[in-house]
Image (tube, helix red, strand yellow):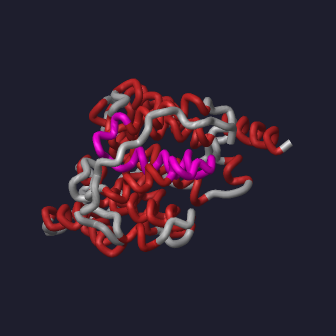
Protein backbone atom coordinates (compact mmCIF):
# COMPACT_ATOMS: atom_id res chain seq x y z
CA UNK A 1 0.00 0.00 0.00
CA UNK A 2 2.79 2.46 0.90
CA UNK A 3 4.55 1.74 -2.37
CA UNK A 4 1.31 2.27 -4.30
CA UNK A 5 0.74 5.59 -2.54
CA UNK A 6 4.26 6.62 -3.49
CA UNK A 7 3.66 5.71 -7.13
CA UNK A 8 0.37 7.58 -7.26
CA UNK A 9 1.97 10.59 -5.62
CA UNK A 10 4.76 10.66 -8.17
CA UNK A 11 2.25 10.28 -10.97
CA UNK A 12 0.68 13.54 -9.86
CA UNK A 13 3.98 15.21 -10.65
CA UNK A 14 2.90 15.19 -14.25
CA UNK A 15 -0.24 17.17 -13.45
CA UNK A 16 1.03 19.89 -11.11
CA UNK A 17 3.75 22.46 -11.71
CA UNK A 18 2.82 25.62 -9.77
CA UNK A 19 5.64 27.74 -8.43
CA UNK A 20 6.17 29.63 -5.20
CA UNK A 21 8.42 32.29 -6.71
CA UNK A 22 8.03 34.93 -9.39
CA UNK A 23 9.99 33.69 -12.43
CA UNK A 24 13.35 35.41 -12.62
CA UNK A 25 13.06 35.91 -16.37
CA UNK A 26 9.88 37.95 -15.84
CA UNK A 27 11.39 40.41 -13.38
CA UNK A 28 12.40 43.87 -14.51
CA UNK A 29 14.95 44.29 -11.74
CA UNK A 30 16.19 42.10 -8.92
CA UNK A 31 18.01 44.67 -6.82
CA UNK A 32 18.87 48.32 -6.34
CA UNK A 33 20.83 50.29 -8.97
CA UNK A 34 24.62 49.89 -8.83
CA UNK A 35 26.67 52.01 -6.49
CA UNK A 36 30.40 52.48 -6.04
CA UNK A 37 31.57 49.23 -4.50
CA UNK A 38 34.80 47.28 -4.79
CA UNK A 39 33.80 44.22 -6.79
CA UNK A 40 37.24 42.71 -6.27
CA UNK A 41 36.70 42.93 -2.54
CA UNK A 42 33.35 41.18 -2.79
CA UNK A 43 34.89 38.47 -4.96
CA UNK A 44 37.55 37.87 -2.33
CA UNK A 45 34.90 37.45 0.36
CA UNK A 46 32.88 35.08 -1.82
CA UNK A 47 35.84 32.92 -2.76
CA UNK A 48 36.80 32.45 0.90
CA UNK A 49 33.28 32.29 2.37
CA UNK A 50 33.56 29.47 4.90
CA UNK A 51 30.80 30.64 7.25
CA UNK A 52 27.37 32.25 7.17
CA UNK A 53 28.63 35.74 7.99
CA UNK A 54 31.10 35.92 5.11
CA UNK A 55 28.67 34.42 2.64
CA UNK A 56 26.00 36.92 3.66
CA UNK A 57 28.53 39.72 3.23
CA UNK A 58 29.16 38.49 -0.31
CA UNK A 59 25.44 38.39 -1.05
CA UNK A 60 24.99 41.93 0.23
CA UNK A 61 28.01 43.15 -1.73
CA UNK A 62 26.93 41.58 -5.01
CA UNK A 63 23.36 42.80 -4.53
CA UNK A 64 24.60 46.37 -4.25
CA UNK A 65 26.53 46.23 -7.53
CA UNK A 66 24.26 43.98 -9.61
CA UNK A 67 22.91 46.21 -12.41
CA UNK A 68 20.50 43.72 -13.93
CA UNK A 69 22.68 43.26 -17.00
CA UNK A 70 25.72 41.28 -15.86
CA UNK A 71 25.48 37.49 -16.24
CA UNK A 72 28.56 36.86 -14.10
CA UNK A 73 27.11 38.72 -11.14
CA UNK A 74 23.77 37.03 -11.68
CA UNK A 75 25.45 33.63 -11.49
CA UNK A 76 27.35 34.56 -8.34
CA UNK A 77 24.17 35.71 -6.65
CA UNK A 78 22.33 32.56 -7.71
CA UNK A 79 25.11 30.38 -6.32
CA UNK A 80 25.55 32.40 -3.13
CA UNK A 81 21.86 32.28 -2.24
CA UNK A 82 21.58 28.55 -2.94
CA UNK A 83 24.72 27.76 -0.96
CA UNK A 84 23.52 29.90 1.95
CA UNK A 85 20.21 28.05 2.05
CA UNK A 86 21.83 24.61 1.85
CA UNK A 87 24.71 25.19 4.25
CA UNK A 88 23.56 27.85 6.69
CA UNK A 89 19.78 28.23 6.57
CA UNK A 90 18.39 27.62 10.07
CA UNK A 91 14.66 27.45 9.36
CA UNK A 92 12.45 26.42 6.46
CA UNK A 93 11.47 30.06 6.02
CA UNK A 94 15.10 31.17 5.88
CA UNK A 95 16.04 28.40 3.47
CA UNK A 96 13.03 29.04 1.25
CA UNK A 97 13.81 32.73 0.98
CA UNK A 98 17.35 32.07 -0.22
CA UNK A 99 16.44 29.18 -2.51
CA UNK A 100 13.79 31.30 -4.22
CA UNK A 101 16.26 34.15 -4.71
CA UNK A 102 18.85 31.76 -6.12
CA UNK A 103 16.32 30.24 -8.51
CA UNK A 104 15.24 33.71 -9.65
CA UNK A 105 18.79 34.78 -10.42
CA UNK A 106 19.45 31.53 -12.29
CA UNK A 107 16.30 32.09 -14.35
CA UNK A 108 17.34 35.67 -15.03
CA UNK A 109 20.71 34.49 -16.34
CA UNK A 110 19.08 31.84 -18.55
CA UNK A 111 16.78 34.53 -19.95
CA UNK A 112 19.80 36.46 -21.24
CA UNK A 113 19.73 33.83 -24.00
CA UNK A 114 17.32 35.54 -26.44
CA UNK A 115 15.88 32.29 -27.82
CA UNK A 116 15.12 31.01 -24.32
CA UNK A 117 13.65 34.38 -23.35
CA UNK A 118 11.38 34.36 -26.39
CA UNK A 119 10.23 30.83 -25.61
CA UNK A 120 9.23 31.58 -22.01
CA UNK A 121 7.64 34.85 -23.10
CA UNK A 122 5.57 32.74 -25.46
CA UNK A 123 4.33 30.56 -22.62
CA UNK A 124 6.81 27.69 -22.56
CA UNK A 125 8.00 26.36 -19.20
CA UNK A 126 11.66 26.02 -18.34
CA UNK A 127 11.73 22.33 -19.24
CA UNK A 128 10.39 23.14 -22.72
CA UNK A 129 12.45 26.26 -23.33
CA UNK A 130 15.72 24.69 -22.14
CA UNK A 131 16.20 23.19 -25.61
CA UNK A 132 17.36 26.67 -26.67
CA UNK A 133 20.05 26.87 -24.00
CA UNK A 134 23.66 26.06 -24.84
CA UNK A 135 27.02 25.50 -23.16
CA UNK A 136 27.29 29.13 -22.10
CA UNK A 137 24.11 28.63 -20.08
CA UNK A 138 25.12 25.42 -18.30
CA UNK A 139 26.06 26.93 -14.96
CA UNK A 140 22.74 28.74 -14.69
CA UNK A 141 20.91 25.55 -15.65
CA UNK A 142 22.75 23.48 -13.04
CA UNK A 143 22.15 26.09 -10.35
CA UNK A 144 18.47 26.18 -11.28
CA UNK A 145 18.19 22.40 -10.94
CA UNK A 146 20.04 22.49 -7.61
CA UNK A 147 17.91 25.30 -6.21
CA UNK A 148 14.58 23.81 -7.29
CA UNK A 149 15.51 20.31 -6.08
CA UNK A 150 16.70 21.46 -2.67
CA UNK A 151 13.76 23.84 -2.26
CA UNK A 152 11.37 21.00 -3.02
CA UNK A 153 13.13 18.59 -0.65
CA UNK A 154 13.88 20.90 2.28
CA UNK A 155 11.10 23.49 2.27
CA UNK A 156 7.99 21.55 1.26
CA UNK A 157 6.25 18.69 3.00
CA UNK A 158 3.12 16.56 2.88
CA UNK A 159 0.66 17.45 0.15
CA UNK A 160 2.90 20.28 -1.03
CA UNK A 161 5.25 17.64 -2.37
CA UNK A 162 2.42 16.22 -4.44
CA UNK A 163 0.93 19.50 -5.62
CA UNK A 164 4.28 20.98 -6.67
CA UNK A 165 6.04 17.85 -7.85
CA UNK A 166 5.90 19.07 -11.43
CA UNK A 167 9.02 21.04 -10.50
CA UNK A 168 10.96 17.80 -10.32
CA UNK A 169 9.68 16.68 -13.70
CA UNK A 170 11.02 19.95 -15.09
CA UNK A 171 14.42 19.41 -13.47
CA UNK A 172 14.73 16.08 -15.31
CA UNK A 173 14.27 17.80 -18.67
CA UNK A 174 16.88 20.41 -17.79
CA UNK A 175 19.28 17.70 -16.57
CA UNK A 176 18.79 15.75 -19.78
CA UNK A 177 19.63 18.91 -21.74
CA UNK A 178 22.76 19.35 -19.61
CA UNK A 179 23.78 15.75 -20.30
CA UNK A 180 23.34 16.34 -24.02
CA UNK A 181 25.53 19.45 -23.88
CA UNK A 182 28.35 18.09 -21.68
CA UNK A 183 27.90 15.10 -19.32
CA UNK A 184 31.31 15.73 -17.69
CA UNK A 185 30.50 19.33 -16.81
CA UNK A 186 31.53 20.67 -13.40
CA UNK A 187 33.49 17.59 -12.30
CA UNK A 188 30.60 15.17 -12.67
CA UNK A 189 27.94 17.38 -11.06
CA UNK A 190 25.50 16.82 -13.93
CA UNK A 191 25.93 13.04 -13.83
CA UNK A 192 25.51 13.09 -10.06
CA UNK A 193 22.38 15.26 -10.16
CA UNK A 194 20.76 13.06 -12.80
CA UNK A 195 21.52 10.01 -10.66
CA UNK A 196 19.92 11.62 -7.62
CA UNK A 197 16.78 12.24 -9.65
CA UNK A 198 16.47 8.48 -10.24
CA UNK A 199 17.11 7.80 -6.55
CA UNK A 200 14.28 10.12 -5.49
CA UNK A 201 11.86 9.03 -8.20
CA UNK A 202 9.75 5.97 -7.23
CA UNK A 203 9.78 5.06 -10.93
CA UNK A 204 13.51 5.78 -11.24
CA UNK A 205 15.97 3.19 -12.48
CA UNK A 206 18.08 2.53 -9.39
CA UNK A 207 20.77 0.63 -11.29
CA UNK A 208 21.15 3.62 -13.58
CA UNK A 209 21.23 5.94 -10.58
CA UNK A 210 24.17 4.08 -9.06
CA UNK A 211 25.99 3.93 -12.38
CA UNK A 212 25.57 7.68 -12.82
CA UNK A 213 26.83 8.42 -9.30
CA UNK A 214 29.85 6.19 -9.87
CA UNK A 215 30.49 7.90 -13.21
CA UNK A 216 30.31 11.22 -11.38
CA UNK A 217 32.98 10.05 -8.94
CA UNK A 218 35.15 8.86 -11.83
CA UNK A 219 34.77 12.30 -13.46
CA UNK A 220 35.32 14.31 -10.29
CA UNK A 221 39.10 14.84 -10.62
CA UNK A 222 39.32 15.28 -6.86
CA UNK A 223 36.24 17.50 -6.47
CA UNK A 224 34.24 16.71 -3.34
CA UNK A 225 30.61 16.78 -4.47
CA UNK A 226 30.27 13.34 -6.03
CA UNK A 227 31.71 11.31 -3.13
CA UNK A 228 29.93 13.41 -0.52
CA UNK A 229 26.65 13.04 -2.39
CA UNK A 230 27.03 9.32 -3.05
CA UNK A 231 27.54 8.81 0.66
CA UNK A 232 24.65 11.06 1.69
CA UNK A 233 22.03 10.02 -0.82
CA UNK A 234 22.91 6.40 -1.50
CA UNK A 235 25.17 4.70 1.04
CA UNK A 236 23.59 6.27 4.14
CA UNK A 237 19.94 5.52 3.25
CA UNK A 238 20.90 1.98 2.22
CA UNK A 239 22.79 1.35 5.46
CA UNK A 240 26.04 0.55 3.63
CA UNK A 241 28.18 1.74 6.52
CA UNK A 242 31.64 0.76 5.33
CA UNK A 243 31.16 2.35 1.93
CA UNK A 244 29.63 5.37 3.66
CA UNK A 245 32.65 5.80 5.92
CA UNK A 246 35.06 5.32 3.05
CA UNK A 247 33.51 8.10 0.98
CA UNK A 248 33.05 10.48 3.91
CA UNK A 249 36.57 9.94 5.24
CA UNK A 250 37.91 10.68 1.77
CA UNK A 251 35.94 13.94 1.71
CA UNK A 252 37.21 15.02 5.12
CA UNK A 253 40.83 14.24 4.28
CA UNK A 254 40.97 16.57 1.29
CA UNK A 255 42.50 20.03 1.38
CA UNK A 256 39.46 22.28 0.80
CA UNK A 257 41.67 24.96 -0.75
CA UNK A 258 43.42 22.59 -3.16
CA UNK A 259 40.46 20.56 -4.43
CA UNK A 260 39.15 21.72 -7.84
CA UNK A 261 35.65 22.31 -6.48
CA UNK A 262 35.09 25.76 -4.91
CA UNK A 263 36.41 26.24 -1.38
CA UNK A 264 33.08 27.72 -0.24
CA UNK A 265 31.35 24.44 -1.14
CA UNK A 266 34.17 22.19 0.05
CA UNK A 267 33.96 23.42 3.64
CA UNK A 268 30.22 22.73 3.60
CA UNK A 269 30.74 19.20 2.27
CA UNK A 270 33.41 18.51 4.90
CA UNK A 271 31.33 19.80 7.80
CA UNK A 272 28.36 17.77 6.66
CA UNK A 273 30.56 14.69 6.22
CA UNK A 274 31.75 15.00 9.81
CA UNK A 275 28.16 15.36 11.00
CA UNK A 276 27.13 12.20 9.15
CA UNK A 277 30.05 10.22 10.55
CA UNK A 278 29.30 11.31 14.09
CA UNK A 279 25.69 10.23 13.66
CA UNK A 280 27.01 6.81 12.71
CA UNK A 281 28.98 6.69 15.97
CA UNK A 282 32.41 7.36 14.49
CA UNK A 283 34.71 8.51 17.33
CA UNK A 284 35.12 12.27 17.48
CA UNK A 285 38.81 11.94 18.31
CA UNK A 286 39.36 10.01 15.10
CA UNK A 287 37.66 12.74 13.12
CA UNK A 288 39.94 15.33 14.69
CA UNK A 289 42.91 13.58 13.11
CA UNK A 290 41.43 13.96 9.63
CA UNK A 291 41.80 17.07 7.56
CA UNK A 292 43.92 18.71 4.88
CA UNK A 293 47.17 17.48 6.45
CA UNK A 294 46.10 13.86 6.36
CA UNK A 295 46.72 11.57 3.45
CA UNK A 296 44.49 12.23 0.44
CA UNK A 297 45.33 8.99 -1.30
CA UNK A 298 42.21 7.15 -0.16
CA UNK A 299 40.43 5.50 -3.08
CA UNK A 300 36.80 4.57 -3.50
CA UNK A 301 35.72 1.38 -5.15
CA UNK A 302 33.78 1.81 -8.39
CA UNK A 303 31.97 -1.46 -7.82
CA UNK A 304 28.22 -1.02 -8.06
CA UNK A 305 26.58 -1.07 -4.61
CA UNK A 306 23.77 -3.48 -3.91
CA UNK A 307 20.55 -1.83 -5.08
CA UNK A 308 17.15 -1.90 -3.41
CA UNK A 309 14.04 0.12 -4.16
CA UNK A 310 13.48 3.23 -2.06
Residue at image position (34%, 71%) is: 51
Number of marks in picture: 0
Q: In the rendered structure, does residue 238 fall within the stretch colored magenta? A: yes
- Which of these two is toward me, 92 or 216? 216
Kindly give the residue lying farthest to the top in the view shown: 180
Considering the image in quadrants, where does the N terminus appear? top right
- Which of these two is toward me, 257 or 129? 257
Relative image position of residue 20 (x, y in whole percent): 57, 54
Q: Quadrant of residue 132?
A: top left
Instruction: Examine the rendered structure and indicate whether residue 193 appears above or below residue 81.
Output: above
- Which of these two is toward me, 144 or 255? 255
Residue at image position (56%, 52%) is: 241
Describe residue 246's horizontal placement relative to residue 281 as left or right: left
Can residue 62 be seen here? The reply is yes
Considering the image in quadrants, where does the C terminus appear? top right
Q: Label the magenta part by its dominant secondary structure.
A: helix
Instruction: Examine the rendered structure and indicate whether residue 98 appears above or below residue 209.
Output: below
Q: Which residues are magenta?
A: 218-244
Relative image position of residue 206 (x, y in whole percent): 61, 33
Residue at image position (42%, 73%) is: 285
Describe residue 93's horizontal placement relative to residue 302 as left or right: right
Q: Quadrant of residue 151?
A: bottom right
Q: Quadrant of residue 263?
A: bottom left
Q: In the rendered structure, does residue 202 fall within the stretch colored magenta? A: no
Residue at image position (39%, 41%) is: 189
Instruction: Examine the rendered structure and indicate whether residue 172 appears above or below residue 155.
Output: above
Relative image position of residue 26 (x, y in whole percent): 43, 47
Relative image position of residue 176 (x, y in whole percent): 47, 29
Amino acid sequence: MEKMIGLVGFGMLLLQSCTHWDPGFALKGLSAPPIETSLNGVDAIFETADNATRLNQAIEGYSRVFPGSDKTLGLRLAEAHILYAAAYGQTKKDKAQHYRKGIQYAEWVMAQNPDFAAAVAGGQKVDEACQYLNQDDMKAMLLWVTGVSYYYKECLSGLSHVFHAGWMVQTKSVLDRLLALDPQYEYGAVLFSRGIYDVANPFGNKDRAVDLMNQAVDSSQGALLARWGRAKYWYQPKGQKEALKQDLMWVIRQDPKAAPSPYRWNVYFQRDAQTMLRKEGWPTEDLAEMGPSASSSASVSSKKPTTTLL
